[in-house]
Amino acid sequence: MKSIPRRHFIRTTSATAIAAPTIIPAHVLGKDAPSNRITVGFIGTGGHGTGWNLPAYLSNADARILAACDPDDGRANHAKGIIDRKYGNKDCATTRDFREVLAREDIDAVMISTPDHWHTLMSVMAIRAGKDVQCEKPTLTINEGKLLIDTVRKHNRVFQTSTEDRSVPVYHRMAELVRNGRIGKLQRIEVILPKQPGRPGDPTPQPVPKGFDYDMWLGPAPEAPYTKDRVLFDFRWISDYSGGVICDWGTHLFDTAQWGNDTERSGPVEVEATGSRWEGGLFDTVNEYDVTYRYANGVTMTCRPGNPSIKFIGSEGWVGNTGWRAPLQASSRDILESKIGPGETRLFTNPKGEHRNFLDCVKSRQDPYFPVDIGHRVSTVCHLANIAIDRGRKLKWNPEKEVFIGDDQANEMCRIRPGRGEWKLG
């Protein structure tokens, strides 16, 4: 049976059911029937889009990908090839302009896998177009995240901040151990992020490759000459498009830290940091960093470069790991082998990952395990570090009002950026 878009199926079957009785095959009424499928548009089909997000969606039979969008024709066509081979047809549409995806009434949700400077603008436009959204992290500024929350809640859409951490057993396990007092009273959290990149970047202008809509790639970012180090993976190290390594990696490990600290809907009250930014090349995000946060509950969190790791230290022991997704470690075997009882705190997760969780929530209309407001709070922790490094002084933060206390310049750094041409948030 040829794939039938979910909304079209509902319209046509309701219209024809009155006309005559029909013998309906079982596969049409089952859990993977066209009427139960969630139709998806993919926006951004680079390495993470096709290497991580696309296989996850294609492995879920109740999702159907109808479109692949990327300003690079080669990448969009590569994604189309993967999708069409999976479905055994040639139906997947391609486009350079994501607005064509948002305009399609037969698409229920979008997966956004773009550079950071597009995350909030695309998400807001998708939500206003009636789509549910799964979007890569992080936001570009603190006030962007506040606008995104308002938009999601106003339009009652499902939004998943797309990271796998809450479904990774080692991070879920350590957060539950901490929340249930297995290390006593939490005192300190040590977060280690990588030191990236390893070079300053080449700013030499180059011809725009054929088949690449560079103006669309820039979108709301300032006009700038094309160079290969500006796009693809390396956009992360340029402040017009991202917040550097602290935002890229911090959104992962700071989430586990906030989860274990029970501050996932709040944040620190103070931050101080030293560091420097890349100079003499294309890249300008933070290079060196040493950050200390303090929370109202007395917990201190530090962040330094090295092997990506996290450690919770309490009055009666510690728990953590050394290395990304590395095995759980603790100060005692009793902590490692501890069981979380039925009356204790159990943290919401989905072992099948963020994509499966999102699809389930599109159906149930419940918040996913990493909803928009928690994602915003984690991005905020990252932005606080960058702002503190730039200000060069200890900053006091009010997590309820989400403003710096007594520092107008720091508050100005939270703003939504103006946007270029037609690409403006508001």
Image (cartoon, grey):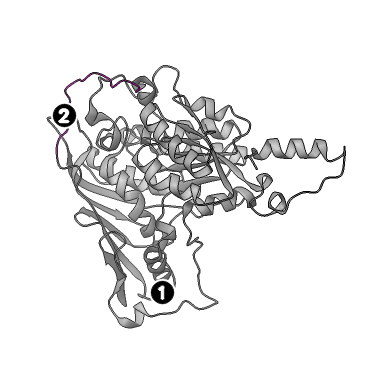
The location of residue 38, given as percent across then percent down, is: 60, 44
Residue 95 is one of the magenta-drawn residues: no
Q: Which residues are magenta?
A: 199-212
Vertical side of 346 occupied by 139: above or below: above
Kindly state the secondary structure of the residue where label 2 is placed. loop
Residue 203 is one of the magenta-drawn residues: yes
The location of residue 65, given as percent across then percent down, is: 53, 40
Q: Write the residue at 44% across / 73% down.
A: 180
Q: Write the residue at 37% across / 21% down.
A: 213
Report the front residue among 308 and 407: 308
Question: Which residue is most to the left?
Answer: 280
Q: Distance between the Cα atoms at labels 1 and 2?
A: 49 Å
> In which quarter of the view is residue 424 placed?
top left
Q: Nearer the viewer, mark 1 or mark 2?
A: 2
Within 10 angstroms of label 2, few (less than 14), some, or many (20 or more) residues?
some
Judged left or right of residue 238, residue 164 is: right
Q: Which residue is mark 2?
A: 202
Judged left or right of residue 134, residue 363 is: right
Report the front residue among 308 and 51: 51
Q: Which residue is mark 1?
A: 181
Q: Write the residue at 56% across / 43% down.
A: 64
User: What residue type is disc 2 on?
Assistant: Asp
